[in-house]
Image (cartoon, grey):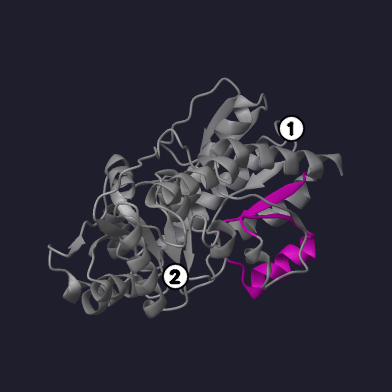
Amino acid sequence: MGQAAIEWMAYHQALGLAKLGHKVLLFAPEGSKVEHENITLVNVGKGGSLSGIGKEGVDLQSKRLGTSYKMRLEITNLGFLIGELLDRDNQFDILVNNLRGEAVVVPVAQLLRKPLVHVMHLPLFDELSSLFKRYNTHLISISDAQRKAFPDLNYAGTVYNGVDPNFFTYNEKPEDYYLYLGSIGANKNPKDAVLACKKAGVKMMIGGRIKDKDYYDKEIAPHIDDKNIKWVGEMHPADVVKLYQGARAFLFPTLWEEPFGLVMIEAMSCGTPVIAYPNGAVPEVVEEGFNGFLVKNVGEMVGKIKEMEQCSLPDRQAGNVTMLQWRRNARKSVEEKFTIEKMVAKYEEVLKKILRY
């Protein structure tokens, strides 16, 4: 659906803090663009996750240089990054780490004698947790649920992800379909959303990046009929907004311990309530009976879809809430808790706290 969520959050961190008057040294892939008088952009790397030579270019080089090329490319880019950090150590007071290859920066920060805070966009694992313990690394979780597996680390705060409500704009009058957008794979479990819509007898739009082709071919493709269940694939961000706006509800039957779930607040910003499985951070985003429903299986999801269908009719309600109220509540949730401005303000608060100590 466009640029990855982690990159968007890092972009908004930098721009938001710059707008608040902070000087920001931003290390980003070659070709990145962000313009503000308080931001100095430092381009590092020519491929891999720090940049964008593209999958085809990486695959071509892999054929020529061997299957370890992708890993070597990542490490090379990280080497460029570390070199820039060492060369510019007098240009910053604190390091905010959004890297997927987060571990390599941790000992470097200690060498530079600079405080480091790592933003936990991804789940932790035992070895990474041990490294953070060794260096007593400051961590920012993106949900409270994210801390449960490793509760004894040095958490500096929780900062929820945010969206721009001026981009994900509100719509009061949905169309007649339900929506799933996101990764297509077993952990995200879009199959249950499809089954629920079929059993409820409602139309559905489904799309996203196919992470597991075998899963898509076996569990999703057989249900696509382009009439009641329609595949929309990956789409331009503006078209994604229209899909959110038109849906009666967004379906999110995730099976894994979701670190946050950005698609939920994107949908809610457009006025679309969420019906979701209560795994990971989901209960911190979906308030039962206010901006959506928490369900445990396909059968319960079917029941809530039918309630939504009832309240889409004139003078009918679901849980004593009309469709208009559902949509206003969803938007209100975002405005009160999940905007870019609130996210940046919280980052500023946490960073100031770390620098004081």
Q: Can residue 90 be seen in the rendering of this structure? A: yes
* Residue at disc 2, secondary structure: loop
Which one is earlier in the sequence, the residue at label 1 or at label 2?
Answer: 1
Q: Is residue 133 left or right of residue 245?
A: right
Closest to the camera, between mark 1 and mark 2, is 2
Q: Nearer the viewer, residue 53 or 274?
A: 274
Q: Position of residue 86 (x, y in %)?
A: 68, 41
Amino acid tagged 2: Thr
Marks 1/2: CA–CA distance: 44 Å
Look at the image and tell me in which quarter the C terminus lies: top right
Q: Position of residue 113 (x, y in %)?
A: 80, 45
Residue 26 is inside the magenta segment? no
The residue most toward the top is 37
Q: Residues within 10 Å of mark 2 (few under 14, many from 20)?
A: many
Bounds of the magenta span? 114-143
Q: Position of residue 42 (x, y in %)?
A: 54, 34
Residue 130 is inside the magenta segment? yes
Q: Is residue 338 left or right of residue 220?
A: right
**Disc number for residue 254:** 2
The residue most toward the right is 357
Q: Position of residue 346 (x, y in %)?
A: 68, 42
Q: Nearer the viewer, residue 349 or 354?
A: 349
